[in-house]
Image (spheres, helix red, strand yellow):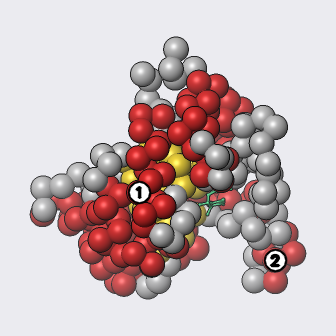
Amino acid sequence: MKNNPVYCALDVPEIDAASRLAQQMGANVGGLKIGMELFYARGRAGYEQIARFGQDIFLDLKLHDIPNTVAAAVRALVPLTPAYLNVHAAGGAAMMAAAAHAAHAAAHEAALPPPKLLAVTVLTSLSDADLNDIGVRGTPHDQVLRLAALAAENGMDGVVCSSEEVALLRREMGAKFKLIVPGIRPAGADQHDQKRVMTPEAAMAAGADILVVGRAITQNPDPGRAAKEIADSLGLNA
Ligand code: C5P
């Protein structure tokens, strides 16, 4: 099978439910996303229980603090060997550079693979008015591009972006910069609270590297089959 770009978001606080989902995914996803909900509820032990299924993990903790504190947090997380780890680009150049340096240094010292570091640019929940309220002038697109460029200059391997921005970022940031896209829904699936969604095929065609899929898989009565259907739609099981 070709590399599967789909990461299933395990957005559940209960470790048993998360483990069941991880098991049901089998070879039909390329990885699993563990976010704040599961990590804050179940911690490292919960993470390790999920990691036992052998999938790549995107640890979505969106770190944002002074450079020294974020670097220390990254060093503490490197032994978990997530494939991807993220920080907020709004933490600034020095914070991202410190995170990148800490990831490489800690991984080197422990002879472990370093996580790829991703930056969150603008949360998709923020409207133009919300950005204005926090003092950001210009459009969300301008801000996303500015922060993506800053992220690339400061050691980030890519960004998490909405489906609306993926084509633009692929054009502007080049082929190697990783683009991780949530808000993915197979054609006809429930949109839930996502304002803008894209099908897996369209997001890949627009230049995505990783598709984060939560409820379209996890709330399906047969999550394993839902994941398989997405893989099929991408031509991965052919
Ligand atoms: O259930 P659904 O597929 O909408 O879940 C999307 C996942 O991606 C959730 O874990 C959500 O936190 C995450 N995410 C998002 N939009 C962003 C960044 C992350 O939906 N801009």
Nearer to me, 206 or 79: 79
Relative vertical location of residue 67 with respect to residue 195 in this rendering, above or below: below
Q: Is residue 68 left or right of residue 236?
A: left
For ligand 1, the image quadrant comes to: bottom right
Q: Earlier in the sequence, mark 2 or mark 1?
A: 1
Direction right: furthest residue? 129
Mark 1 residue type:
Ser
The residue singled out by tag 2 in the image is 130
For discs 2 and 1, the disc positioned in front in the rendered view: 1
Relative vertical location of residue 85 with respect to residue 13 in this rendering, above or below: above
- Mark 2, Cα crowd under 10 Å, few <14 / some 14-19 / many 20+, is few
Residue at position x 78%, y 75% from top? Answer: 131
Q: Position of residue 224 (x, y in %)?
A: 53, 39
The residue singled out by tag 1 in the image is 19
Residue at position x 46%, y 60% from top? Answer: 18
Nearer to me, 114 or 138: 114
Quadrant in which residue 72 is drawn: bottom left
